[in-house]
Amino acid sequence: MSVSVRIKNLSKSYKEVVALQNLNLTINAGELFGFIGPDGAGKTTLFRLITSLLLPDAGEITIDNMDVVKEYKKIRKMTGYMPGRFSLYMDLTVEENLKFYAGIFKTSLQENYDLIADVYQQIEPFKKRRAGALSGGMKQKLALSCALIHNPKLLILDEPTTGVDAVSRKEFWVILKKMQQNGITILVSTPYMSEASLCDRVALMQNGNLLSVAAPNEITADYPHRLLQIKSDKMFRLLADLQEIEAIISAYRFGEYIHLSVAHHDDAFVGNLQKILSEKGHQSLEIGAVQPDIEDCFLELMDKNNLV
């Protein structure tokens, strides 16, 4: 059976630095829940509090009605945790690392092989290789195997795909979906906005605050403005010129384009915008409507909450 997680009035500071500010959140049993935000948003601190590696300044966290501080021993036995930094023993082989972590939980690789088979079979041909000699993607799969070896009900993954190539990132999320089907509640953090759509629900975080908590499609549906994308032959000047136009609510770089939010747009608006920019010396202009994604929503929420 999977477990639910309840966070109530949670706060944590490091001297003058406020890491988390009065967080309230409920994660449902069996959910694949994502925490999305840049470095410094508070994701790692939150995960360390959930796993009782840190103590909160205020508030509480319960996992299936068990307080993570008072009943940390029970909770650690039912939790698999994969920190953001690779923390296995570099001088031990793949197989030795797995046997070591299985021994901590008084089980064995043979006894629980079926629990990690989907992940471990991809690195099993290299089981005699030292962990320090593995590629980034293989290290992450080894770390995930160690986190799963004791059949946890709750799996917590702190930025598991950071620094991993695109193919390995895609494979990793396929694996997570399979783990969810096995009845595990999964909490995953990532700085990649594109990974938000792979979660059942996400929490957008910045500066220790929850900006929004909802399903990814609900977040994008709530975007309050019309959105255009634009580029020209003078992209650096283009951003500054757009920010001087009163009708534009916001403008920011988005890949090869600039995304700009406006209250409304039609052919007349686009034609007038093109004329203004042409008079400022911009050529090869491309202007068109675009649907907002999670990153657009994140930036809008930051602006709304004065966090930019």
Image (tube, helix red, strand yellow):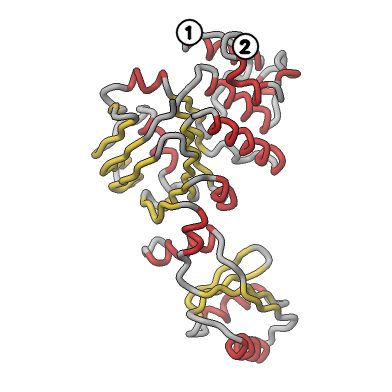
- The image quadrant that residue 19 belongs to is top left
125 vs 3, left or right, is right
Q: What is the three-letter code of the residue carrying label 2?
A: Glu
Q: Residue 209 at x, y = what percent?
A: 36, 51
Marker disc for residue 96? 2
Q: Secondary structure at mark 1?
A: loop
Q: What is the three-letter code of the residue carrying label 1?
A: Lys
Marker disc for residue 89? none
Q: Residue 161 at x, y = what percent?
A: 60, 39
207 vs 102, left or right, is left
Above or below, 117 relative to 161 = above
User: Residue placed farthest to the left in the image?
Assistant: 58
Above or below, 285 relative to 185 = below
Marker disc for residue 106? 1
125 vs 140, left or right, is right
At a point 65% along the width and 17% down the height, the residue shown is 94
Q: Residue 50 at x, y = what percent?
A: 37, 32
Position of the N terminus, as image quadrant, is top left
At a point 55% along the width and 83% down the height, the residue shown is 265
**Circle 1 crowding by C-alpha within 10 Å: few under 14, some 14–19, many from 20:** few
Q: Secondary structure at mark 2?
A: helix
Disc 2 or 1, which lies upstream in sequence? 2
